[in-house]
Amino acid sequence: MPTVARASRLFCAITFAVVTTPALAGLSSETPEYARAGYLSDCQKFLQVVAEVQAGRQTPKEATPAIKMHLSTFELHRYYLPQSSLGSPEYARCESGVPIAKEIADKGEIELSKDVDEYLAQAQTKHLASSDYKRARSLGFSDVGEIGELDQHAELDGEANLKTLMIRVDSGCGRHFRAAKYVEPYVIYTVGPSDGKCAINRNVAVLGGKVAAWGEYIDDEAIFQYVGWKTLPGQDGFPVNIRVVKVVK
């Protein structure tokens, strides 16, 4: 279902950002002095988090993002440590704390996974009971989609599935679409990256809708069905590929 899929997509994006961004940012070489300072700093930080968990002030779930972040850069700094540091008491103390920190993070990820499963199940139940879903099913559609997320729906579930959805005007991005050009029999609507939650420029061509004046917002009460891609003249006159939806009578 689109509602559950969006929640899952968001969770994956957050997890990827928390766990991998420091690693991706630290691929350049480090001087031994910088590596040692960074290694000890990250060691102190993840050991502090471990101590919070052991004292019962944090749960593994709460501690996991910080542990993952600090361990990621900790391991990068370790790669550039000078040989003289490998026999130091600080090195031994830090390395002995790594398995404990990883065990806590593993437990935290299990807890987070259970929370996500529970959230998705609740979202699924709520979605199936929604008036939009019931209306979509009564009209012969498989589910509900958002006009402001056509690209995301297609990327996640494919173009063929997109054609089975009852498309509504969503509040995040879709309601910001404004009429920009009329190319008979289509009205082309556009949004910019600063409009609502759109983030990027988007275009959609509407077939069979009401007559719209330039700059008029899209009809947020309309129901649409996805048609596919169409090559139409753009605002500058050059042809552009654009997604087309038609109004369901």
Image: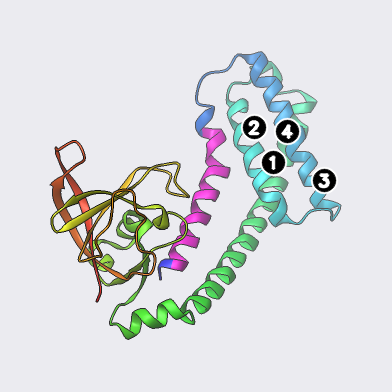
Magenta portion: prevailing SS class: helix
Q: Are marks 1 and 2 in contact (CB under 8 Å)?
A: yes
> Does dot 2 land on a helix, a strand or a loop?
helix
| Residue designated by label 2 | 74
Circle nearer the viewer, 1 or 3: 3
Where is residue 97 drawn, in percent x and y?
74, 41
Where is residue 145 drawn, in percent x and y?
36, 66
Q: Which mark is residue 98?
A: 1
The mark nearer the N terminus, 1 or 2, is 2
The amino acid type, in three-letter code, at marker 1 is Val
> Marks 4 and 3, Cα distance to the nearest angstrom?
12 Å
The mark nearer the N terminus, 1 or 4, is 4
**What's drawn in magenta, residue-wise?**
3-23
Report the residue at 82% width, 45% height from top. Answer: 51
Report the front residue among 199 and 15.
199
The amino acid type, in three-letter code, at marker 3 is Ala
Circle nearer the viewer, 1 or 4: 4
222 versus 217 height, above or below: below
The mark nearer the N terminus, 1 or 3, is 3
The quadrant of the picture occupied by the N terminus is bottom left
The mark nearer the N terminus, 4 or 2, is 4
| Residue designated by label 3 | 51
The amino acid type, in three-letter code, at marker 4 is Cys
